[in-house]
Amino acid sequence: MHIDLLIAAIKPNIPFASEIVAQIFLNAYDDEDQSALITALYIGRSHIHNDNLSSDFEPGLLKGEINRHWDDDTVPKKDRAKVLFEKNTNLTSYYDAFIRCTGNSKYNRDTF
């Protein structure tokens, strides 16, 4: 699923009432889409005060080296719901930063 659609789907669920509720949300999506949500939140968190992608991320995203599976090693599947619950009220800001910075940097999110 396109990352924009995933972000649109998660936003009405924020904040998650519990880790279990976050897991129920994630269960509706395949592994690849779950990975995309986690990676997008971490990219967004790294760009929370930016308007464009930083030089640490832009080349990797444009070359496809940074993709929806970028944070799979950082956040194993069993911990995804925990991360969503822990980041809870910040998720909207993180996803907004991801959209803002990738858009302003002309990154084609169709490839994410």
Image (cartoon, rainbow, N blue to C red):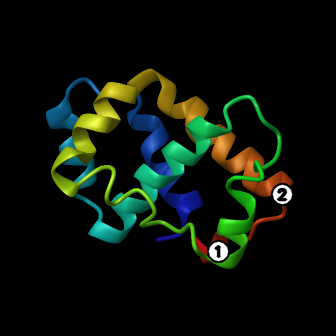
- Which label belongs to residue 37? none
Q: Quadrant of residue 57?
A: bottom right
Answer with left or right where residue 110 lies relative to residue 108. left
Question: Can residue 95 be seen at all in this image of the molecule?
Answer: yes
Question: Residue beneath label 2, please?
Answer: 105
Determine the image quadrant of residue 88. Answer: top left
Circle 2: element type = loop
- Tell me the residue at 20%/35% (across/down): 21
Residue 100: percent from the left, percent from the top? Answer: 75, 45
The quadrant of the rendering that contains the C terminus is: bottom right
Tell me which corner region of the image, top left, top right, bottom left or bottom right, holds residue 51.
Answer: top right
* Residue depicted at 53% across the width and 68% down the height: 67
In this rendering, the answer to whether 26 lies above or below 95 is: below
Residue 52 spot, x, y in % from top left: 82, 47
- Mark sitting earlier along the chain (1/2): 2
Q: Between residue 56 and residue 61, name the one nearer to us.
A: 56
User: Residue 12 or 43: which is nearer the viewer?
Assistant: 43
Residue appearing at x 33%, y 37% in the figure:
84
Number of other residues with Cα within 10 Å of mark 2, as a class: few under 14, some 14 to 19, many 20 or more: some
**Structural distance between the alpha carbons of marks 1 and 2:** 14 Å
Circle 1/circle 2 CB separation < 8 Å: no
Q: Determine whether 74 is above or below 64 in the image.
A: above
Callout 1 crowding tier (Cα within 10 Å): few <14, some 14–19, many ≥20: few
Q: Position of residue 9 (x, y in %)?
A: 45, 50
Q: Is residue 7 left or right of residue 22?
A: right
- Count of numbered circles in the view: 2
Amino acid type, residue under disc 2 in the picture: Ser
Residue pointed to by mark 1: 110
Q: Amino acid at mark 1?
A: Asp
**Of circles 1 and 2, which is in front?**
2
